[in-house]
Amino acid sequence: MSSQLKNLSDFSHTTIPNGANYKFGIIVAEWNAEITGALYNGALKTLLENGVLADNIVSLPVPGSFELTGGAEILLSKRSDIDAVICLGCVIQGDTKHFDFICDAVAQGVTNVGIKYSKPVIFGVLTTNNLEQAQDRAGGKHGNKGDEAAITAIKMADFSANI
């Protein structure tokens, strides 16, 4: 497993643009709130640390990861000034195929919303086998996927603005 021995939230190998000129949406799932709250805190902190003004961040909760796509769609349909949307959620494998259906729907949905609006819509969704793996990736030994999603959003907003 590639993440077994390293922190995935190390950005020392890349240049991160200043985010001061961009507006971001953060859509965060309430399901698995311990994990998604940590993802949200990481994303928010990372945006602010990279120059994004607090007034340029719109944060909205949705019930679960399945609703992330709808939340991103609604936000972008009502706010054309948003440069990128970060979708944060956590789906933990259970005993049924529900996990597979939710993960596939969210991944496809996030992609489709981004294509529809020609805006970066970032997949910051953990899809783990158990709670421990989720904790490890939400501020634990493997970093914080929220940080990674925020950096990706900044880089993609900058990419889009400079094309």
Image (cartoon, grey):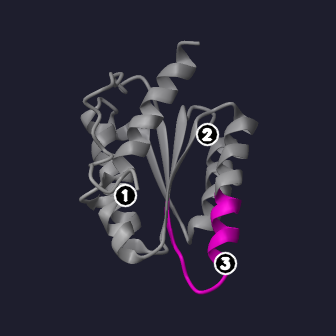
Q: CA distance from mark 1 to mark 2?
A: 23 Å
Residue beneath label 3, please?
Answer: 98
Give the SS element for disc 1: helix
* Callout 2: SS: loop
Question: Is 47 displayed left or right of 61 in the figure?
Answer: left
Name the amino acid, label 1: Leu
The C terminus - image quarter = top right
Q: Residues within 10 Å of mark 1 (few under 14, many from 20)?
A: many
Q: Which numbered disc, 3 or 2, marks the residue that appears first in the sequence?
A: 2
Check disc 1 and report the residue beneath it: 39
Say which mark, if any, is on residue 79. 2
The region drawn magenta spans 89-106
Label 3 and label 2: CA atoms lie apart by 32 Å
Cβ–Cβ below 8 Å for labels 1 and 2? no
Which residue does the image show at 33% across and 25% down from the upper left? 14
Judged left or right of residue 154, residue 111 is right
- The question of residue 83 being in magenta is answered with no
Camera-nearest residue between 156 and 137: 137
Q: Is residue 28 visible?
A: no
| In the image, residue 93 lies in the stretch drawn in magenta | yes
Q: Nearer the viewer, mark 3 or mark 2?
A: 3
